């Protein structure tokens, strides 16, 4: 836990793909609280903020965590087709044209 709290940047990639176990929820919330205004956290997720309560399995904890994460934050919301899907579609179109 000490290492996680001291690192310059903590990255949570693909956050929310699966619900968290109760112990993990408590640990993550504690990390977010301890790093609040002391260390940077970068979060990537396919979930909207409104869906985070489902991941935390607790409306109050998710609200408190999001409050800390979003304070002083830069939020980027990317909408549209994923680059992977777009790339597959382009490949399929090129194959169809060459056939």
Image (cartoon, helix red, strand yellow):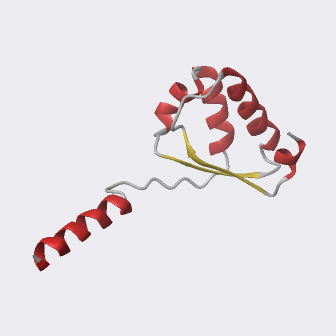
Question: Does residue 4 appear to the left or right of 18 in the view shown?
Answer: right
From this view, report whether residue 33 is shown above or below residue 97.
above
Q: Quadrant for residue 7, please give it.
A: bottom right
Q: Residue at x 18, y 73 (%)?
A: 95
Q: Residue at x 25, y 70 (%)?
A: 91
From this view, report whether residue 84 is shown above or below residue 97.
above
Determine the residue located farthest toward the front in the rendered image.
Answer: 99
Work out whether residue 56 or residue 85 is closer to the camera in this orientation and state it.
85
Q: Quadrant for residue 33, please give it.
A: top right
Q: Position of residue 43 (x, y in %)?
A: 61, 49
Q: Position of residue 9 (x, y in %)?
A: 75, 56
Instruction: Give the number of marks.
Output: 0
Q: Position of residue 61 (x, y in %)?
A: 65, 25
Q: Residue at x 79, y 51 (%)?
A: 39
Tell me the quarter of the image containing the C terminus. Answer: bottom left
Q: Position of residue 51 (x, y in %)?
A: 47, 32
Q: Residue at x 66, y 45 (%)?
A: 71
Determine the residue located farthest toward the right in the rendered image.
Answer: 2
Tell me the quarter of the image containing the N terminus. Answer: top right
Question: Does residue 87 appear to the left or right of 38 in the view shown?
Answer: left
């Amino acid at each position: 836990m000490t290492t996680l709290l001291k690192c310059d940047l903590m990255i949570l990639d693909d956050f929310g793909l699966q619900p968290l176990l109760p112990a993990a929820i408590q640990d993550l919330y504690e990390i977010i609280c301890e790093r609040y205004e002391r260390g940077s956290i970068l979060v990537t997720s396919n979930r909207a903020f409104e869906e985070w309560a489902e991941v935390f399995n607790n409306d109050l904890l998710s609200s408190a965590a999001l409050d800390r994460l979003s304070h002083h934050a830069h939020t980027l919301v990317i909408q549209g087709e994923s680059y992977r899907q777009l790339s597959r579609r382009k490949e399929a179109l090129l194959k169809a044209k060459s056939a």
